[in-house]
Image (tube, rainbow, N blue to C red):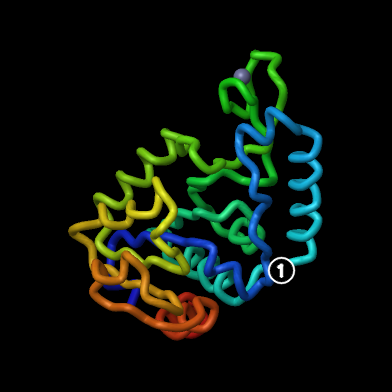
Amino acid sequence: MLDRYQKVVFWVGAGLSQASGVCPPPAHNRLSFLHQPEKVWADYQAWKGHLRSCRPNAGHECLAQMQRSHPQVRIVTLNQDGLLQRAGCQVLELHGSVWESCCFQCRLRDCSCAARQRPDVVWSGEELPQENVQRALAWLGECDCLVTVGASGTVPPAGPMPLEARQAYRIEINPAETPLSAHHHECWRGPAEELLGKLFPSGNPADR
Ligand SMILES: [Zn+2]
């Protein structure tokens, strides 16, 4: 199926990591960090400990195989857990990564502000990293196939971004209907780790 398309974008949300048993990230924001930075860091350290005990699942592995056999496959992720990367995927992160820290003042990972460090994740109410947003929008604007995987479409501002892939053939993989469902040509209902392997069996070159 992937061979039919020149440019494929997978838009990945939290649903993909569910089968890995990943708990939601700590519910912190800029304000809680200002008031209790130690508590925020401790909670993120605890989440990282939890993530280390989780393994990439068949869905993560399937995407990694697809990317290896089809270099035209691009992956945009809303997840901060790093599981796609651990499976070997190249990804564009829209909500940052719990495995990185950045400057509280300018949000860069390397800078000369001498301000305190914070986890490099996007908190509720914050802007997404603009450079990555621009690249994601460019990918959506030029892809001929979009596969939305485990993304609820409800969390602004990234939620409705898949709608920008107007020219693409659009497939949704999600157990339940989402606000994005009506904008897809096909909706596959079920867990991502099962459906990805069924929909894209050619992900593994050995299977062809
Ligand atoms: Zn800085």
Q: Quadrant of the N terminus?
A: bottom left
**Residue 163 percent across, percent down from the top left:** 27, 56
Amino acid type shown at disc 1: Arg
Left or right side of 109 for 74: left
Is residue 154 visible in the rendered structure shown here?
Answer: yes
Left or right side of 154 for 65: right
Is residue 73 visible in the rendered structure shown here?
Answer: no
**Residue 4 percent across, percent down from the top left:** 27, 72
Residue 83 lies in quadrant: bottom right
The relative height of residue 54 versus residue 33 in the rendered view (above or below) is below
**Residue 189 percent across, percent down from the top left:** 40, 82
Q: Secondary structure at mark 1?
A: loop
Residue that label 1 marks: 55
- The residue at the point 75 percent across, 54 percent down is 47
The relative height of residue 33 versus residue 23 in the rendered view (above or below) is above
Work out whether residue 172 or residue 36 is closer to the camera in this orientation and state it: 36
**Residue 122 percent across, percent down from the top left:** 55, 41
Work out whether residue 102 or residue 207 is closer to the camera in this orientation and state it: 102
